[in-house]
Amino acid sequence: MDDSSKLVGKAHPGARTGSVPLKDPLPMVLRVPTAPYRPGDSPSFVAFSHQPDDLPRPDTLASYESLREHAIGLIRVLDADGSARGDWQPQLSPQQLRSGLEMMLRARHLDVRMIAMQRQGRLSFYVSSKGEEAAAVAGAAAYLHGDVLFPSYRQPGLFLVRGMPMVTIICQSIGNVGDNTGGRQMPVHYSWRAGNVVSISSPVGTQFPQAVGAAMAFAYRGERHVVGTWIGDGTAAQGDFHYALNFASVFRPPCVLHVVDNQWAISTHRSIATGGATFAARADAYRLPGLRVDGNDYLAVYAAEAWAVERARRGGGTTLIELVTYRRDAHSTSDDPSQYRAAGEPDCWPGGDPIERLKQHLIVIGEWSEESHQSLNAALEQEAAATFQMAESFGTNATGLGHASDALFHDVYREMPPHLQAQRAEALGETDAPQKEEPAILRFVEGPRRAAG
Ligand SMILES: Cc1ncc(C[n+]2csc(CCOP(=O)(O)OP(=O)(O)O)c2C)c(N)n1
Ligand SMILES: [Mg+2]
């Protein structure tokens, strides 16, 4: 671009003008990265080069500098044949592993049923977590009940672990009277106060600074609770990511921040959310430990999570965890990945499937079998179908969602202001109530205008 360009302002009289001699200039072009594969390509990925024995598991109060390799490497426990190896092996009993497997499989069947029902018009919208169940289930399993979690929409498994009944999860997405958010939220925007899980917000990333703030409040009150929060790779390009890390760096609250790198943000590949560095490596600039973890390895996710939770509970502050995984389904039921992603990509992703990998491990250690897996699979498929049917007994799009006609007036004010009381009465056909009262908002807007005129 030369000086005559309309985009370049006029020089200040004291500024240098003309051109500057440059040594071996590179072409001045805007770098716009793209995905490695697009529809029509034959994708192939190299296997993960990192092995389970690569990285030591330091004490949970180790300095952030001593964890730099953990932010650029990959914490793994399960090897290619399903054996557990290395320092990061968590001490989970076979029973704990089986219940982790069951919870991941339950989340998978919930997804399958919900997508099928959306296709029949019985749900307006759904978001699948297929392939990312370990991130949610093993992640949530490492926290205590009093810890508070701020997930994203892609962790239904986390809500299941925290005790949200599947029927309530389904009712939330239908928006019927069994929905604990009263039909006022988008589908998949769950909220589960009894399990200390904070509502999903539609603007992505807002949960990161909120979680750090909640953890700061626990530290301020001297309460030894930990806060966990999850965002996606695309969301890590939002300012909220950095605001959260800076607050975490300055105030060192008991928090675990996760970036679930599932390679895609709708149609945008991860390569447009990072200039090449791992997400975990960003922690270093904030003097926080960063752990990059094989997100489809249930044992590794649990181990890393337990490490970070213990560090936070011991008073060691915040950790950033990157979970490397793959979004196997479409972004949502409104998305069609065949428009932007190579068809074979999900199947050749080197991280495999988290359910298959944990199943294989349990078989290797003699705690599971193909037969037991098949019968669990059939039982959970049946459970998801029966639970969907039960959820529809609370109301459907076809027969009505069952909300009281004045439901939109509830839960906003402790004491309903007069103008809303009037509107509510009008909606309910109670003619004796004052109906013509001017809404408060108009009085507020018009006041200054009158004064100025
Ligand atoms: C602030 C904001 N911008 C854009 C959107 C629309 N949107 C919803 S999900 C999404 C992609 C997020 O991708 P990522 O963070 O990788 O999470 P993933 O969906 O892959 O789990 C976008 C752009 C939004 N909800 N909020
Ligand atoms: Mg993503």
Image (cartoon, grey):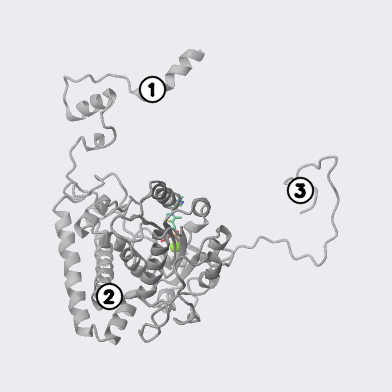
- Mark 3 secondary-structure assignment: loop
Q: Residue 135 carries which label?
A: none
Question: Disc 1 marks which residue?
Answer: 442
Q: Closer to the camera: disc 2 or disc 3?
A: 2
Q: In which quarter of the image is the N terminus?
A: bottom right
Q: Specify the amino acid type for callout 2.
A: Leu
Q: Which of 323 and 396 is in front in this view?
A: 323
Horizontal side of 33 relative to 122 (left or right) equals right
Q: Residue 5 carries which label?
A: 3
List x then y, in percent, for residue 91.
Answer: 32, 76
Horizontal side of 306 relative to 388 (left or right) equals right
Question: Disc 2 marks which residue?
Answer: 97
List x then y, in percent, for residue 366.
Answer: 25, 86
Q: Which of marks 2 and 1 is nearer the N terminus?
A: 2
Q: Closer to the camera: disc 2 or disc 1?
A: 2
| Among the 4 quarters of the image, the one containing residue 392 | bottom left
Q: Residue at x 51, y 14 (%)?
A: 452
Horizontal side of 48 relative to 360 (left or right) equals right
**Location of ligand 1 given as a quarter of the image:** bottom left
For label 1, count other residues whose C-alpha is less than 10 Å away and answer few (under 14), some (14-19) or many (20+).
few
Q: Specify the amino acid type for callout 3.
A: Ser
